Amino acid sequence: MVILLLALSFFRLPFYIEKPGMAHELDSIVQVQGGYPEKGKLMLTTVQLGKANIYNYLLAKVKKYDDIVPVDEVKDQNQTDEEYNVYQLYLMESSKHNAIQIAYKKANKPYHFVYKGVYVLDVYPKMPAAKVFQPGDRIVKVDNHTFSSSDQFIQYIAKKRVGDVVQVGYVRNNEEKTGRIRLATFKASGGKVGMGIGLVDDRELISKPKVTLKTDSIGGPSAGLMFSLEIYNQLTKQDITRGYSIAGTGTIDPDGKVGRIGGIDKKVVAADKEKADIFFAPDDEITPEMKKAMPNIKTNYQEALLAAKDIGTKMKIVPVKSFDDALTYLQKLPQKNR
């Protein structure tokens, strides 16, 4: 019986379980060199996502904020777990870059980007690149040619013919490597010649003062808004927390626009457990196309309000469309008397 129960716990179902995660204080994650301290706290919120087994599947059936999610709603059916994880880390890096840009521009502090190479997001299994590359590799040269953008890399490969062999230099886990790839017809790009990879620019952001974000265990783009607020707060003398505990969520783009995220009801639960006073929720636009596809769809703000009412929290749910919306709200708060 014990062996059977143990076996069932390891048997994976074709689902993920999504449930409330945690609210993490950002001053332990974000470090601006010489940054100013804060009396309150800014917190990112997370959703816990794990593969389903028979036990957590049955538990999710009875727990209100635990959701059972089909695998194909989490990741593409052709995407490996490794590729999914690499993509989530890439989204996190992009989120951090956007947050730094917004905060430094608002605080009138300098920053710039340095191009590092071509970042391999995914590798097509039946293409030549599969014998050389892994998701997360950084391509730094091809045939001793270096590039200043992924567009230049694509243009160089496009001039080749099917069957041509290229010498590639790349970095994996900080170790320089080389390999040879025979180019083939790449169906995913409309039959053009290619290696068989999904790629993006790999850029490093250099800022003054230096800022470090320690996010090794967190993936995805949804902490962008809260990152930008924490970075800005450490860059400027005026403490925008005013002594309050402030949680929230939302992607951030380079222009400061806050975007929609998933699982906001679970993030409200997580923030309430940490006794947050305020929760920022994206006040995202619902387009006619979205409404047609999903008639019952709500904005993140509406979803957050419903969750807050359901759990009976005293936490204030605040709608935001941009970084400036959140900053203006905080700057107008009276100082909290503890």
Image (spheres, rainbow, N blue to C red):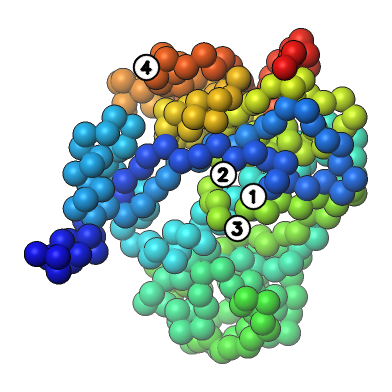
Spot the residue most to the left: 1
Could you tell which of marks 4 and 1 lies nearer the N-terminus?
1
Could you tell which of marks 1 and 2 lies nearer the N-terminus?
1
Give the residue type at disc 3. Asp
Q: CA distance from mark 1 to mark 2?
A: 7 Å
Q: Could you say which disc has been placed on residue 94 in the image?
A: 1
Circles 1 and 2, Cβ within 8 Å, touching? The answer is: yes
Could you tell which of marks 2 and 3 lies nearer the N-terminus?
3
Residue marked by disc 2: 221
Q: CA distance from mark 4 to mark 1?
A: 34 Å
> Which label lies toward us, 1 or 3?
3
Q: Up-down: is 94 above or below 257?
A: below
Q: Nearer the viewer, residue 132 or 87?
A: 87
Give the residue type at disc 1. Ser
Which residue: 29% across, 30% down? Answer: 64
Q: CA distance from mark 3 to mark 4?
A: 33 Å
Could you tell which of marks 4 and 2 lies nearer the N-terminus?
2
Disc 3 on helix, strand or loop?
A: loop
Could you tell which of marks 3 and 4 lies nearer the N-terminus?
3
Q: Up-down: is 29 above or below 108?
A: below
Q: Position of residue 288 (x, y in %)?
A: 40, 20
**Figure quadrant of residue 84:** bottom left
Whether residue 327 is visible here, answered yes or no, is no
Residue marked by disc 3: 216
Q: Position of residue 78 (x, y in %)?
A: 33, 62
Give the residue type at disc 2. Pro
Q: Up-down: is 199 above or below 20?
A: below
Residue marked by disc 4: 310
